[in-house]
Image (cartoon, grey):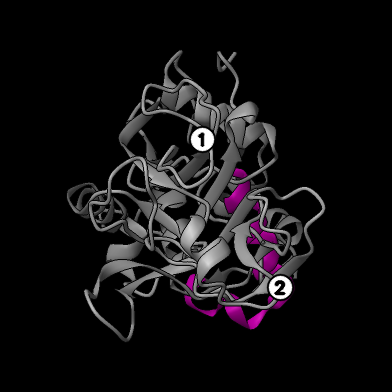
Amino acid sequence: MTLDKIAQGSAGPVAFATLGGDTALATEVQQRLTEAGLLEPPADGQFGPISLWALGEFMARIGTPAKSQLDKESARALLAPSVKTLFPLVLPPTLAGRLAAAVLAKGWWFCRHPGCVNIVYVEGMNPDGTANEDKPNIFNDLRTVLQVDADGAVQLVGSWQGTTEPGTYYSKIKVLDPNGAARIAFGQYKAWEVGMHPRNGANPHEALVQVGPITVHRDLNQDFERTGDKTFTGLFGVNQHWGFDLPESDIGNASAGCLVGRTKVGHREFMKAVKSDVRYIARPGFRFTTAVLAAADVPDSPA
């Protein structure tokens, strides 16, 4: 069965609750919801709670919130070219607009639903949006949370000093892996859930914990650079946690490759922001997507 056949009236209707029983159709619907800016790729055809949420939000936006089945009307709406503008995206001349533009320029995902957040880290960027020299062992990277407003304009929910890189301690003094310290590869990954860091040990606190694969560079030559380093993909415990209020000038033992916000207060603000996401509220096991950019990839203007 296909959306086109349902739209023509030669198949269907299909109850939303049973879409997962037809993998091909479910995948097609998911792809259209991704085009609408509601559902993160890739489409898997399973059509679980988040897919059902996204479809419900789509139906509400086209004025049929009570609809519970995929019929001719809803299939035609999903197939319409206007699906791409149903949830608009406006890039203002601000840091938020610049970051969103950088994410989109990479061909990465950006959620356009006003109740959802987008997590973006920028390596070598100051809180005011200017680039820095990105010297090693310093909290000189930027952690941000972005969200669109009711009109589709991208807003900065919050930004905090942080690091996307391991410091000297875990790069040279206490190297945890024979291949070298982990440094996350620039990219976008759907790989984190709300949990506790560390899972065992002192000072446990709420964080985003890695539950899906990411790619890292291993700094075997201890030069604090990715160039020439071997890459590995998997689960490495690269969590998003706080940096224990350590000074800006010394990462200390706060990061062995994790995505770290320097201060405890700032990290609590970060967690409050991500937990306000309606997808997390609907399903606490929701897996968050995070983008990691270089400052050089962020344009001076979103235009």
User: Closer to the camera, 51 or 82?
Assistant: 51
Q: Is residue 23 above or below residue 124?
A: below
Q: Which residue lies under the disc numbered 2?
A: 179
Residue 282 lies, in percent from the top left, at: 31, 67
Q: Determine whether, in the image, residue 257 is placed left or right of residue 201.
A: right
Give the SS element for disc 2: loop
- Please state which of the two labelled residues, at mark 1 or mark 2, is closer to the viewer: 2
Q: Is residue 104 above or below residue 27?
A: above
Give the SS element for disc 1: loop
Q: Is residue 6 magenta?
A: no
- State the mark number for residue 86: 1
Q: Determine whether, in the image, residue 219 is placed left or right of residue 85.
A: right
**Alpha-carbon neighbours of circle 2 within 10 Å: few (<14), some, or many (≥20)?**
some
Residue 87 lies, in percent from the top left, at: 48, 36
Of all residues, the one furthest to the bottom in this rendering is 200
> Could you tell me which residue is drawn at 53 percent across and 52 percent down?
165
> Could you tell me which residue is drawn at 57 percent across and 30 percent down?
295
Of all residues, the one furthest to the front in this rendering is 173
Of all residues, the one furthest to the left in this rendering is 265
Amino acid type, callout 1:
Leu
Give the extent of the magenta segment: 16-36
Q: Determine whether, in the image, residue 263 is placed left or right of residue 183.
A: left
Task: Tell me the chief SS of the magenta region.
Answer: helix
